[in-house]
Amino acid sequence: MQPMVWTETTIKTERLTLRPLVDKDKPAIREWMSSSEVRRFLGGPVGEAHLELLELAVVGEQWGVFCIADNSSDEPLGSCTLERERGELEVSFQLLPEYWGRGIAREAVAAAMKWVWNNADDRSIIAVTQEANVSSIRLLRSLGFAEEATFEEYGATQVSFRHTRPTSTATLDT
């Protein structure tokens, strides 16, 4: 029996494929979810109990999670997530450290945003990151997100951003 996936969509960019997570991605998911470096601005590494549940999960059933994979090897590099836990559509991302600084997160988030604008009725997308996460703030601003507010959460100052639906999705670079 095939697992139910949140979308059958696969998004291709110049270097990346955004696709549903599959079982073969579990070792990479475990790596980025347990990494203090990756999770530095995301509340820290998840605990062993969470990781054990992940091993039992059918990963493609989680709504809103794209695996960011290399086009040529299909190797998982990280994830790009769309969720509504804050009441609005929020984009977030995480990459294994060896892929930082290569424009991969920007390419993946831009592709996910374009997908939202072409497939959903949302008027805007939000993003939240810690004020100390200057790389993510720079990335969000480069994609046209505007800072809205700061607030305290998880013991740190957070910055919320918003990107409003463009009149044309052709202008979004992927």
Image (cartoon, helix red, strand yellow):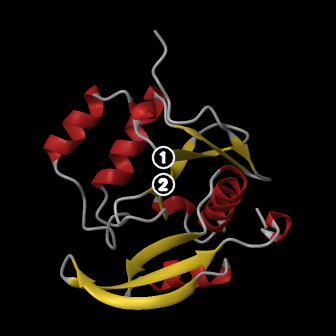
The image quadrant where one finds the C terminus is: bottom right
**Pointer 1 or 2: first along the chain:** 1
- Secondary-structure class at tag 1: strand
From the top left corner, tell me how far across and down residue 148 is, in percent. 47, 89
How many C-alpha atoms fall within 10 Å of the one at disc 2: few (<14), some, or many (≥20)?
some
From the top left corner, tell me how far across and down residue 67 is, in percent. 53, 44
In the drawing, does residue 41 fall left or right of residue 139?
Answer: left
The label number, if any, that marks residue 79 in the structure image: none
Amino acid beneath label 1: Val
Residue, x 54% and y 46% (percent of image)? Answer: 66
From the viewer's side, name the closer residue of 72 and 116.
116
Residue, x 32% and y 52% (percent of image)? Answer: 33
The image quadrant where one finds the N terminus is: top left
- Give yes or no for contact between labels 1 and 2 (Cβ–Cβ under 8 Å): yes
Residue, x 28% and y 30% (percent of image)? Answer: 55
Q: Which residue is mark 2?
A: 81
From the top left corner, tell me how far across and down residue 25 is, in percent. 46, 35
Q: In the figure, 39 relative to 164: above or below? A: above
Q: Which residue is mark 1?
A: 65
From the viewer's side, name the closer residue of 7 and 138.
7
- The quadrant in which residue 133 appears is bottom left
Q: CA distance from mark 1 to mark 2?
A: 4 Å
Q: Residue furthest left?
A: 49
- Secondary-structure class at tag 2: strand
From the top left corner, tell me how far across and down residue 107 is, in percent. 68, 63
What is the total number of numbered labels drawn onto the structure image? 2
Amino acid beneath label 2: Thr
